[in-house]
Image (cartoon, rainbow, N blue to C red):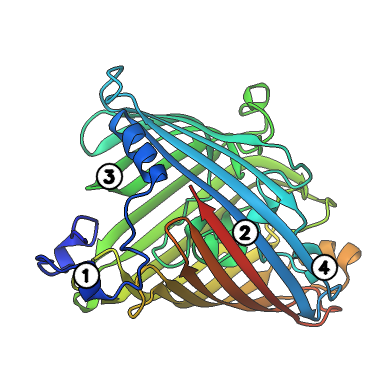
Amino acid sequence: MNTCTNSYESFACDCGTTTCDQLGCDGVGCESPSWLQGIHATLASRGITVTNNLTQYYFGTVSGGLEETDRYGGHGDYLANLDLGKMGVQEGLFIKLRAEHHFGRSIGEPAGVLLPPTLPTELPVADSRDLYLTNVLFTQFLSERFAVYAGKLDTLDGDANAYASGRGITQFSNAAFIANPIALRTVPYASLGCGFVIVEGTEPIFNFLVMNPTDTADSDGFSELFEDGVTLSAEWRFATDWLGKPGHQLLGGTWSSRDYVSFGQDPRILLPNVPVNRVDGSWSLYWNTDQALWVDPCDSSRHCGYFARAGIADDSANPISYLLSAGLGGSNPWREKDSFGIGYYYSGTSDEVGPILSTVLGSIGDSKGVEIFYRSQISRTVSVTPDFQWISQARRELSDAYLLGMRVNIAF
C-alpha cells in the first residue's frame, strides 16, 4: 500500500510488502479507488492536477470576548496546476490557478480578537462573498533546480512549516499558527509579483519575491502595479537531520517601500480602518523550525514532532512588533490518516501603534493564545476536526475568549 517516495524517504525503512491490514489503517486507506480518483488520475496524465477544498466552520464563544454566540462560515479553495510540458506546449512551464471565496459569518468579530481564529472564513476579501482568482502564476524551470515565476499570487503558503501551515484547512485554523503574522503589514495577501526559486528534490530551499505592496485579490492589479512602491521578500529553508530524524530551519525577511497612512481592510488581521502616523516603509524578520520526533518506519509521509516560530518587525507601522509560538503536531502514530496539533503563541503589540488603536478599541496590550485540534479522516474526501482555542485579549477591556468549534473539510 505504502511507498517510501517523498521528502522524508532517506529516513524511512524498507517498506517491503507490508499490507494495509497489517498496518491497521481502520479502513480509511483500504478503500478501492473512487471514480473521483479516476478522473484526477486521467487529468494528471494529461498534465492537469486539481485540488479542491470546501471547508465549513461552526465555532462559538462559550465564554468571554465581545459576545457569547456561535457562527457558521466556510471557505472554498479551488486549485489547478497545469504542466505545459506534458501538454506538449513548453517543457518546464507550469501555470498555477487558484480561485477562492468565503461564505457565512466568522467568529472573529464576536470573539473580539485581532488575529482571526478561523482565518479562511475571512479570505480572500473581507467584505465580499464573491469568487476571486488569487493565483494566475506562470513558472518556468530553467534547470532541474532553478525556476523563475511571474503573475498574480497569494502569500498564504509562505513561512512553510511541516506542523503549522496548512492554509487553515488541514492543520491549525488560527492565523497565529498558519504563517507568521509579523509579515502581514509588508506583504499583501494576493497581488502581482515575480521572482525566482531554487529547489532541492521537490522542496524549495530559497525563494526571492518582488511584489506589488497593495492587495489586489479583488482585481487584476495592473492599474495599481507598483504605484505605492514595492515589497521584497526572501526565504531560505533547509533540511536538517537532528535527533536522526528529519526537520527544517527557515529564515525569512520582508521589506516594503510603501507609505503607510492607515490600517486597510486586511482580512488576515481584524483592525479598524483608522489613520496612523505616516510611515515611510516597513520591514520584518522571522524564523521557524519543524523537527520530527517520530517517523512511521513504513510510511515516511507520516510523522509528528515539534514546531517553533519567532519574528520581529518595526514598531512604527506594524500593530504586532514581535511574535513567539511553539507546539506539537503531525500524524497520529496509532491511527493512520488522522493528525493533531497543540500550539501556544505570544503576540507583542507595538508601543507606537498600540496607543493609536486604543482610541478606538480601548486599552491595548500584548496577547497570547492556545489552540488544540484533532483532525479525523472519516473517508478519502471528508475530515472532521474538533477545535478549542483560548485567547488572552490584546483589548484589555475584554475578558479572555474561550472558543469551541468544529471544522468539516470536503476534498475533491
| Disc on the earlier residue, 1 or 3 | 3
Task: Quote the CA–CA distance across marks 2 and 1.
Answer: 33 Å
| Disc on the earlier residue, 2 or 1 | 1
Task: Quote the CA–CA distance across marks 3 and 4.
Answer: 43 Å
**Amino acid found under the numbered disc labelled 2:** Asp
Please name the residue that numbered disc 4 is placed on: 110
Q: Residues within 10 Å of mark 4 (few under 14, many from 20)?
A: some
Relative side of 206 to 338, left or right: left
Q: Position of residue 349 (x, y in %)?
A: 70, 69
Q: Identify the residue at horizontal 77%, vertical 75% (top origin).
A: 61
**Amino acid found under the numbered disc labelled 3:** Val
Task: Quote the CA–CA distance across marks 1 and 4.
Answer: 44 Å
**Amino acid found under the numbered disc labelled 4:** Pro
Eye-nearest disc, 1 or 4: 4
Mark sitting on residue 241: 1
Eye-nearest disc, 2 or 1: 1
Mark sitting on residue 314: 2
Residue 335 visible? The answer is yes
Task: Quote the CA–CA distance across marks 3 and 2.
Answer: 31 Å
Mark sitting on residue 293: none
Relative side of 271 to 388, left or right: right
Please name the residue that numbered disc 3 is placed on: 199
| Disc on the earlier residue, 1 or 4 | 4
Residue 350 visible? The answer is no
